[in-house]
Amino acid sequence: MNLQEQINRIQEMMGIQEYGKPKIIDYESYIVSKPIKGDSTTTIIFGGYLVSPRETYSYLPKEFINKKNVVVTQYNKSYNTLIEELKKDIDISKITSVIGYSAGAKQLGPVFGKYNFIGLVDPWITNDLLNNLKNNTNNVICWYTKEFWINGVGNMTETSKLQPKLKSILGSRAVLKNMSHKEVAISFMNSYSNKF
């Protein structure tokens, strides 16, 4: 390993990249992360039921959060409410992508067809979500598991029953993964953050 590769590796381990470590604003139900340098585009992530915004944020690659604004919110904050609250911190016209992880996917109804990238990560699926998605599948990628919804979360049989409908709507863009609920989130964020 040459000297530059060693420096890059040390910077990566410390979370220091070309753009610099982000400033984090921590609100009660969401966080806003803004890099010191970088572009002004924003990704919004609606997190899971038992996962705090901070934990969901920890799933994101460092090189991503060091370049782009990121908002991570709780699963139960509505999209419209969040957008109103964000106007004080970011330019909402520069939101480029929205991700719904687990129960957070329930908030994505208004976003289909609106942004460059929409991610559904092991989503809690409802008929309302499927109805909103039907005619707006462009730029939507979904990774899902079966095990979590059948055995892991008590009474979530609705989601396991609706997974085939989701698959038929998205086709090859809905991918069944043999991973844990948390692993699928981390892997999705690492695989697609360059598209957010």
Image (cartoon, rainbow, N blue to C red):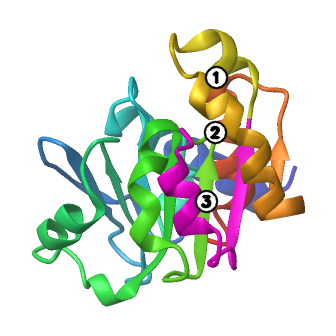
- What is the crowding at mark 3: few (fewer than 14 residues within 10 Å), some, or many (at least 20)? many
Q: Nearer the viewer, mark 1 or mark 2?
A: 1
Residue named by callout 3: 119
Q: How many marks?
A: 3
Which numbered dot is residue 149? 1
**Foreground of the two, 65 or 192:** 192
Q: Secondary structure at mark 3?
A: strand
Which numbered dot is residue 122? 2
Q: Quadrant of residue 53?
A: top left
> Is any atom of residue 40 visible in this view?
yes
Which residue is painted at 28% across and 82% down in the image?
A: 92
Residue 126, x across and y down, in percent: 52, 44
Which residue is painted at 45% across and 38% down in the image?
A: 103
> Is any atom of residue 16 visible in this view?
no
User: Is residue 163 left or right of 127 when viewed as pictured?
Assistant: right
The residue stretch that appears in magenta: 124-144
**Foreground of the two, 52 or 36:** 52
Question: Magenta stretch containing residue 106, yes or no?
Answer: no
- What is the crowding at mark 2: few (fewer than 14 residues within 10 Å), some, or many (at least 20)? many
Marks 1/2 in contact by CB < 8 Å: the verdict is: yes
Label whose residue precedes the other's in the sequence (1 or 3): 3
Label whose residue precedes the other's in the sequence (1 or 2): 2
The kind of residue on which mark 1 rests is Trp
User: Is residue 117 left or right of 42 when viewed as pictured?
Assistant: right
As displayed, is residue 73 above or below residue 148? below
Q: Nearer the viewer, mark 1 or mark 3?
A: 1
Q: CA distance from mark 1 to mark 3?
A: 18 Å
Which residue is painted at 52% across and 56% down in the image?
A: 129
